Amino acid sequence: MAVLLAGGAGYIGSHTAVELINSGYDVVVADNYSNSCPESIKRVEKITGKTIKTYEVDIRDSQAIEKIFVENDIDAVIHFAGLKAVGESVQKPVMYYRNNIDTTLSLLETMSKYNVKNIIFSSSATVYGEENPVPYFETMKRGVCTNPYGWTKAMMEQIFEDAAKADPELSVILLRYFNPIGAHESGMIGEDPHGIPNNLMPYVSQVAVGKRECLTIFGNDYPTADGTCTRDYIHVMDLAAGHVKAVDYIMNNNCVEIFNLGTGVPYSVTEIVQTFEKVNGIKVNHVYGARRDGDLAECYANADKAYEVLGWKTQRNLEDMCRDTWNWQKNNPEGYGR
Ligand code: NAD
Ligand code: UD1
């Protein structure tokens, strides 16, 4: 059975490729490398010992992606391909809507043409917005998003739901990721952000490796136990395993389902820094600064549904996440060197 990973050379796609191959699936990767590089897939090949068919293609280009469906017997698609930097989405909203929505439409059109009926989508906890109380349940309504990136996710969820309503044979799984961090245990693949990282963990590890001087912790006056924001950090390999369970499920069930992929356990920014320092025996220079616009005090999942329906739950703890992040960063101080 072949699974097409659209955006599969990226951080989550590459880790998912490892888990799918290890579970016996064939994978085909399509990526335009706008935020990744072919080296990540070469490393996946080294880890798994399997050759992966890859296409350098813009997923928005329906004609170009048709070739993939003609040349391969695709059973399911996982749609990772998207732009994901929240701040950039505020500066360049049209680029975000164009890329994220168009990739979705092209995939759905081409799948329909080639009679492929299973799609799994990389959504985000961001769609819960500001109004819903934590922990977030899948039954809650999508909220008001705080930035264009978030709106693209909410809109794409709606597009998938509408498409499935119109075509009852189409199965859709919307996976709402919480905060993926960590790396494959080998340290051969990991997160490789361009420029100054926006997200916490890559910033922490780049300070630890000496690439950045000091981490600013955004706000210590939140109504949380230590005053810093809490998030539901999830090991990227646990997240990858969640995708395998979702593929197993969608192959056997005609469904439209939403699953939170998180641990259900929130940790604060200060706890992340302290755990990283303790587990790795390394200092992370940090100062407390002003709050960042748009940040919520708390964000964490209720992850029961994924366990009850998919039989999936996380296996790795915060120490594992911090250790594996550092293992990747110290072995690859320049990431993939792109
Ligand atoms: P990533 O940037 O590492 O991976 C996305 C991949 O998609 C990249 O390889 C990029 O080159 C590719 N891509 C983007 N636009 C494309 C296009 N038009 N055609 C072909 N390829 C294209 O990001 P990631 O962290 O692996 O995230 C994967 C997905 O999960 C994204 O949709 C993201 O929004 C979503 N997500 C990520 C997080 C997170 O914290 N990392 C959280 C929630 C949701
Ligand atoms: C952010 C996005 C979310 C997106 C996710 C993955 C916002 C409001 N949300 O989530 O939509 O799905 O990234 O791309 O941007 N922090 C610091 N110092 C730093 C960086 C972060 O203190 O240098 C703190 C933040 O204030 C936050 C926590 O660390 O409390 C996690 O931040 P981050 O990794 O950016 O993720 P989110 O903001 O949760």
Image (cartoon, rainbow, N blue to C red):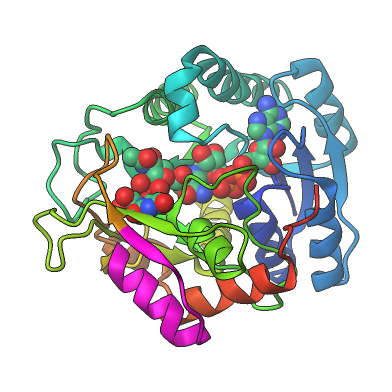
Image coords of residue 185 (percent x, y): 64, 78
In depth, the one of 7 and 167 nearer the eye is: 7
Would residue 159 be found to the left or right of residue 142 on screen? Answer: right
> 252 left or right of 113?
left
Q: Is residue 239 visible?
A: yes
Question: What percent of the width, then of the height, locates residue 303?
Answer: 30, 62
Q: What residue is shown at x 52% (from left), y 59% (from top)?
A: 213
Prevailing SS of the magenta stretch:
helix
Residue 110: name its quadrant: top right
Horizontal arrangement in the rendering, residue 70 relative to residue 108 (left or right):
right
Residue in the image at 44% along x and 31% along y? 87
- Of residues 231 and 29, the one drawn nearer to the viewer in this rendering: 231
Q: Who's the residue at 55% across and 70% down the image?
A: 208
Quarter of image, res 52 = bottom right
Image: magenta residue range: 269-287
Magenta segment includes 280:
yes
Q: Which residue is outermost to the left?
A: 223
Q: Is residue 153 above or below residue 191?
A: above
Q: Position of residue 175 (x, y in %)?
A: 44, 47
Q: Residue at x 23, y 56 (%)?
A: 229
Q: In the rendered view, would you say 5 is above or below 184?
A: above
Percent across and percent down for residue 138 are 26, 47
Q: Residue furthest top?
A: 94
Which image quadrant for residue 150?
top left
